[in-house]
Image: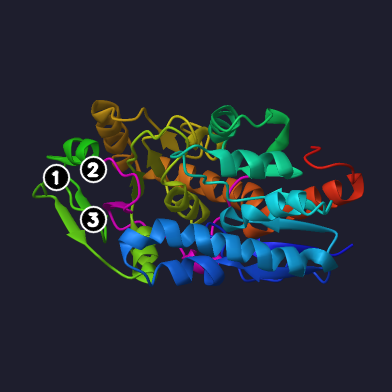
Amino acid sequence: MRFLVARTVTFRDREPWGENVDVSDEIRLVDARGNRLPKSLRAVATRWFQLQHGLQLLWKSRCYDAVAVGRHGVFLPILQRLFGIKRRVVMTDTEWPGTGTGLVNHAAGMSSAAICCNTRWELENLSRRFEIPKEKFRLVLMAFQRPDMREPRDEGYIFAGGDCGRDWNTFVEAVDGLPYEVRVFVTRTKLPRVPPNVTVAAVPRAEYYNQMAAASCVVVPTVHEQLRVTGTTTWINALGMGKVVIATDPCGAPDYMEQGVSGFYVGHGDMEALRRCIAKVMEDAELRKRVGQAARDRAWREFSPEAFRRQVLSLLDSVALRGGSFGAA
């Protein structure tokens, strides 16, 4: 059997998938084109580029037994159903927008063979919001990115960064006055205020992960969103490097770390719990060493690029062999 898979937004790994697998780069075909446009036009243009991409995939996929698409392949299963094509489609990277009617996401989900979700919490929410049977969904943990991996060091400071869905208000209150250096890396957002022990900088991606690798712990303060878990890319890469992660996310973090064993998480907006957890980690070098090693071991075992590829290819094998009618999971 032959498969076509997407190099998508949250999985950019360029290592080969196997002799029977070809890769379609939706980052180049959709994201790169949309990012060249003014922000006011990107939402509409992205939908148009996604439709074009779906039509291209419709033609290209005729040579394959099954196809795994990313978030920008949302139109392929719909188009296949419209044209009466029964090739099986697995959807990955389902960070679907929760705005609008949701008709496109519903139609795509119902027309696909299976849908991969990165957390159990998102699985439940996407199933309910877009009225797609839960049986359609599979938990496939998001992979860390090998080019972002660094050898870990412990240089005594707290790392935090990222722009998407961050709760900087809670974070600033939690670290203000602590006897530790705090380094924050953002590019598009501003902190509500900058305490004396905090520095803020914008750096390229490579330096972002250099700084992460040298930190004593990585804090990922996120807001609670209705459909998705934010901050996953940051904490997954940190875990892959063997860093101690403290996330303000009790929804998605438990799928990637065991509390107090391979990471820590507290409730959204719980400043006092976050402050106590940071102090506990920073005051105990042996704890950091033990939890960091457990984090790295679990990451490379359960959500490495190899683990991700194995799960997606196993799913493609399964749905291709099953055959059957549209939407059968």
- How far apart are the two marked residues, 2 and 3, measured between alpha carbons? 13 Å
CB contact under 8 Å: marks 2 and 1: yes
Q: Nearer the viewer, mark 2 or mark 3?
A: 2
| Above/below status of 200 relative to 224 | below
Residue receiving disc 2: 168
Place of residue 32 in the rendered image (x, y in percent of width and height, measured from the top left): 47, 71
Kind of residue sitting beneath label 1: Pro
Label 3 Cα neighbours within 10 Å, binned few <14 / some 14-19 / many ≥20: some
If the image is split into quadrants, where does the N terminus sit? bottom right
Check disc 2 and report its element: helix, strand or loop: helix
Place of residue 327 in the rendered image (x, y in percent of width and height, measured from the top left): 77, 40
Which residue is rendered at x = 75% and y = 70% of the image?
Answer: 22
Q: Is residue 190 left or right of residue 56?
A: left
Q: Is residue 118 visible?
A: no
Q: Nearer the viewer, residue 54 or 91?
A: 54
How would you classify the magenta stretch by its main secondary structure?
loop
- How far apart are the two marked residues, 1 and 3, measured between alpha carbons? 15 Å
Q: Nearer the viewer, residue 254 or 83?
A: 83
Place of residue 61 in the rendered image (x, y in percent of width and height, measured from the top left): 77, 65
Please say whether residue 186 is one of the residues in the magenta stretch: no
Kind of residue sitting beneath label 3: Arg
| Above/below status of 128 relative to 210 | above
Query: Which of the two discs, 2 and 3, labels the residue nearer the N terminus?
Result: 2
User: Residue reaching furthest left?
Assistant: 196
Q: Nearer the viewer, residue 74 or 203?
A: 74
Where residue 192 is drawn, which disc sits there?
1
CB contact under 8 Å: marks 1 and 3: no
Label 2 Cα neighbours within 10 Å, binned few <14 / some 14-19 / many ≥20: many
The magenta span reads 141-167
Q: Is residue 11 left or right of residue 67?
A: left
Residue receiving disc 3: 183
